[in-house]
Amino acid sequence: ERYALEVSSPGTERPLTKPEHFRRFVGQRARVRTRGDHDGRKNFTGELLGATDDAITVAADTGVVSISYADIHRSNLLGD
């Protein structure tokens, strides 16, 4: 019997799921979708400005917004 091991990278649009992920990629562009309306919107795209233990800060096209991790439905980096 032969065994093969494949290793793959999450790529340029890697998902962001943990506070450590967000901290690692501060300064890069990301797309964040919230579970419900947040400031009248559910989708935010922009530069990650910061990440604490409770929330992230994104410079979206409508301005700077803070989103708690509990409100994030899905998020990922944006490829260049």
Image: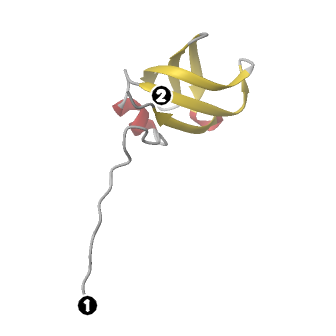
Q: Is residue 16 left or right of residue 26?
A: right
Q: Is residue 48 left or right of residue 8?
A: right
Quarter assignment of residue 8 = bottom left
Image quarter hosting the N terminus? bottom left
Label tally: 2
Residue nearest the viewer, comparing 79 with 39: 79
Quarter assignment of residue 51 = top left
User: Could you classify mark 2 by the number of other residues whose Cα lies within 10 Å: few (under 14), some (14-19), or many (20 or more)?
Assistant: many
- CB atoms at circles 1 and 2 under 8 Å apart? no
Q: Residue at x 65, y 32 (%)?
A: 34
Q: Amino acid at mark 2?
A: Ala
Quarter assignment of residue 4 = bottom left
Label annotation for residue 1 = 1
Image quarter hosting the C terminus? top left
Q: Where is residue 79 shown, x and y percent of the image?
A: 40, 31
Figure check: 76 above or below 42: below
Q: Residue at x 37, y 20 (%)?
A: 27
Please tell me whether mark 1 or mark 2 is closer to you in this view.
1
Label annotation for residue 30 = 2
